Image (cartoon, rainbow, N blue to C red):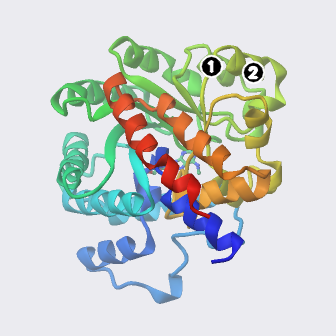
Amino acid sequence: MDEAEGLAEFCRRLPKAELHAHLSGSVTEATIQKLQVKKGVAPDHAHQGDTSIGKGETRQLQEPFRIFKIIQELSDTEEAIFMMTEDVISEFAADGVRYLELRSTPRHVPHTGMTPSSYVESILSAIQTCKDREDVVVRLLLAIDRRQSVETAMNTVRLAQEYALRSHGVVVGIDLSGNPAVGDGRDFIPVLKEAQNCGLKLALHIAEISQQATAPETGALLLLPPDRVGHGTFIHHNPDLAAMVADKNIPLELCLTSNVKAQTVASYGEHHFQHWYSRKHPCVLCTDDKGVFCTTLSEEYRLAAETFGLSRPDLWDLSFSSIAHTFAGEDLKQQLRLRWNSEKNKLLQTR
Ligand code: 6MZ
């Protein structure tokens, strides 16, 4: 095995926590084909590649949002949601992810009878099915899409509140995501405060595009404050915002390939991981949409090592420190630390 293969293998075997994974964006081509068969849509070979952005390709940020719509249209029944959740969990587990926080936007599809509740139940039922089969602990965040009305967002928070109890703690929080060029995040502040008041954790997409470095919503959302920030790509372009994030020590969910392929970051070397990591700010490497961006969490660790010169012990520390930023309870965090430590020596000794 040469040096490069050795690093890739190390990253695959490294126990990892994935904290920023959108369900629809995480499905791979193989699952999309199964969804097409279920729906009676012939897999269209002429359009293969339309649902992912391959190696070396970049597209504008609008493109992934077009792809999410295709995948969401293909997954409009409880059965489809169950199947894709199972597939995504198995794939993360096979990549060495030992703790996974999935996030997804509950949908109402009148023509199939799927409701936001049955959507959430289908995901929870797949998580339950995978519990004994896959070597990974899974938690769920319900997502608010910025395109939605405040009323729909409030219903999502109520659903999360209800299922946090009914799922015995599998549902842990709320995500704010969706096309960053659409809407004003400030509209959702009362809803997000309500979520905080009922004990739900908040992971919010903030400053994903350059306009948001100066948009009033960015400071307002940071003031909540969220428990974690997704992307935060342009936060360090604004010293006041950067100081807020640094002072409150808000962990950042960083997705290298997603940002480079969606052209919000010009190259891996220019990724804001470097800015925050060099200041010892809490950073967690994540995939965002592993299917759409054709990546894996181990590939993101490998890219971070290659681009920023991280050693194997650095990668270990980065993965181990991510446990502190999960939305798991203290007992589970402790179990995860034991699990990680049980693999440490063997992993760091192999070349
Ligand atoms: C913002 C994103 C995103 O909810 O159907 N989503 N939101 N920025 C991104 N960066 C590329 N990637 C995914 O998964 C798809 C939904 O996740 C959000 C969008 O709202 C998208 O519709 P679910 O499982």
Would you say the beta carbon of the disc 1 residue lies within 8 angstroms of ligand 1?
no
Q: Judge whether residue 55 can be spotted in this image.
A: no
Instruction: Depth check: give the residue in front, 210 or 9.
Output: 9
**Contact between labelled residues 1 and 2, with CB atoms less than 8 Å apart:** yes
Using a 10 Å C-alpha cutoff, classify the residue at mark 2 as few (fewer than 14 neighbours), some (14 to 19) or many (20 or more). Answer: many
Vertical position of residue 270 compared to residue 189: above or below = below
Vertical position of residue 1 compared to residue 68: above or below = below
Q: Which residue is mark 1?
A: 222
Q: Position of residue 223 (x, y in %)?
A: 61, 13
Residue farthest along the top direction in this orientation: 197
Using a 10 Å C-alpha cutoff, classify the residue at mark 1 as few (fewer than 14 neighbours), some (14 to 19) or many (20 or more). Answer: some
Q: Which residue is mark 2?
A: 241
Amino acid type, mark 1: Leu
Amino acid type, mark 2: Leu
Q: Secondary structure at mark 2?
A: helix
Please report whichever mark, 2 or 1, sits nearer to the chain's N-terminal start. 1
Q: Position of residue 228 (x, y in %)?
A: 54, 28
